[in-house]
Image (cartoon, rainbow, N blue to C red):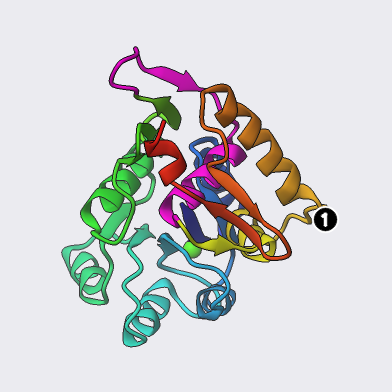
Amino acid sequence: MRILLVEDELDLGKAIKRILHQHGYVVDWVEDGTAAWCYLDDNQTEYNLGIFDWLLPGLSGIELLKRLRSHNDNLPVLMLTAKDSIDDRVAGLDAGADDYLVKPFGMRELLARLRALQRRSPNLTPQRLQVGDLVLDYATNQVWNEDQTAAKQEITLTLKEFQLLEYFMRHPHQILTREQLLAQLWEWDTEPVSNVVAAQIRLLRRKLSQQGYEDVIETVYGLGYRFSPENITSQ
Ligand code: CA
């Protein structure tokens, strides 16, 4: 899950980014609406959710939202605002916001709203993602091997391994290039070393194969990697 966070209050932006990280989200955080539009307009990165503050330098959150909707982009967006009149709520929802959170708010509520948005949107990941007997649980950030004949066994993954596996599970049979994985799973403000994708995949494969999932992530030489669920269901 990749989120675009647009928030110009530095302390709040930092706090939100930190908590979202801890819960497994990949977060790009920008501080003004114009920069946010550049991120949204770039086709290399696919966002799953947006969190837009209302009052921003450059484009306001509402203007950003309107521009997004006028491009037929259905990205689920949660608006953050200090505005709390009925008129403001209506304006936000009319502009195409999917939900609305009034400042100050607790991080637990923010996380719950994001989970609710994930559940509501048909093109978003459900709360559980299952391929074969491999289960990814978004509520707990855990991965299970839910073998019918065995007690369910947890596979302990780091956040990055979890994000990587999620992305593979959501794009089965597709060849994913190293550049694509970098663009989707590593934030723009990090400077990953050149072999970081290969290194993470190696770690993920080792953990999966310890649970009997050999060869689910195949290397397609010269091209990239492919998640092959048939190698799970034949277990
Ligand atoms: Ca603001």
207 and 14: which is toward the camera: 207
Q: Residue at x 32, y 52 (%)?
A: 102
Placement of 79 over or under 18, stated as above or below: below
Residue 16: percent from left, percent from top: 51, 46
Residue 188: percent from left, percent from top: 68, 62
Could you tell me which quadrant the C terminus lies in?
top left
Q: Total number of numbered labels? A: 1
1 and 180: which is toward the camera: 180
Is residue 136 located in the magenta-colored stretch of the structure?
no
Can you identify the residue that label 1 sits on?
Answer: 194
Q: Quadrant of residue 32?
A: bottom right
Q: Residue at the front extreme?
A: 234
Residue 235 seen in the current view:
yes
Q: Which residues are magenta?
A: 147-172
Residue 150: percent from left, percent from top: 34, 14
Is residue 148 located in the magenta-colored stretch of the structure?
yes
Q: Residues within 10 Å of mark 1 (few under 14, many from 20)?
A: few
Q: Residue at the top extreme?
A: 151
Placement of 218 over or under 109, stated as above or below: below
Placement of 217 over or under 191, stated as above or below: above
126 and 191: which is toward the camera: 126
Assign a secondary structure to mark 1.
loop
Q: Specify the amino acid type for callout 1.
A: Ser
Placement of 102 over or under 210, stated as above or below: below
Query: Is 169 left or right of 217, judged from the image as shown?
Result: left
Residue 30: percent from left, percent from top: 59, 64
Residue 6 seen in the current view:
no
Q: Residue at x 31, y 44 (%)?
A: 115
